[in-house]
Image: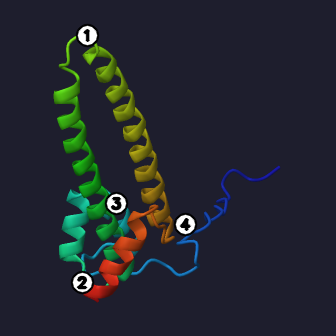
Amino acid sequence: MPDPADPIDPVAPDPAPGPSNGIPPHPTSTGLPSNVAAALACFPLVGGIIFFILEKRDSFVRFYAMQSIIFGAMGLLFWLVWSIFFAILAHIPAIGVIFAVILWLVWAVVSLAALLILIIAIVKAFSGVRWDIPWVGPMARRQVDATL
């Protein structure tokens, strides 16, 4: 039976894993680790603009920031077009209700898809993996490569 007066050696916890590529996250010009800054930059428009302006060295963060800016601008453009269609089509007598329901279903599907893409991008960025949002990623990569 162990003596209660003897101190028990605690087992040290395993260190938190770094990015999946095995390289520990390095600080950016914002002072945050690269993966954290990239994950925060994923928030459409606002996070992207802030981190694209502040971050001058890290292409990983700048890529996610530019991807966020383009994705957010596309979302804003979709909202504008959807609003115009809704304002016009929903007020047509007799069939306006049908158009309104269809447009709301389109809005719901696109919003859920955008939320899913946003969550995947944040998780991938935090994991240290460069992930291209379909159609947006290649545009962001060209823009970042042109500015560096």
Q: Earlier in the sequence, mark 1 or mark 2?
A: 2
Q: Are marks 4 and 1 in contact (CB under 8 Å)?
A: no
Which mark, residue 16? Answer: 4
- Mark 3 = which residue? 42
- Residue at 20%, 66% (x, y): give it: 49
What's under tag 3, amino acid-wise?
Cys
Gap in angstroms between the C-alphas marked 1 and 3 = 43 Å
Task: Find residue 102 and report its image quarter.
Answer: top left
Mark 1 or mark 2, whichever is nearer to me? 1
Mark 4 or mark 1, whichever is nearer to me? 1
- Residue at 25%, 64% (x, y): give it: 48
Q: Are marks 3 and 4 in contact (CB under 8 Å)?
A: no
Gap in angstroms between the C-alphas marked 4 and 1 = 61 Å
Q: Is residue 127 above or below residue 30?
A: above
Q: Are marks 2 and 3 in contact (CB under 8 Å)?
A: no
- Mark 1 = which residue? 94
Q: Earlier in the sequence, mark 3 or mark 4?
A: 4
- Mark 2 = which residue? 56
Q: Is residue 44 left or right of residue 131?
A: left
Element type at mark 4: loop
Gap in angstroms between the C-alphas marked 2 and 3 = 17 Å
Q: Is residue 117 left or right of residue 37?
A: right
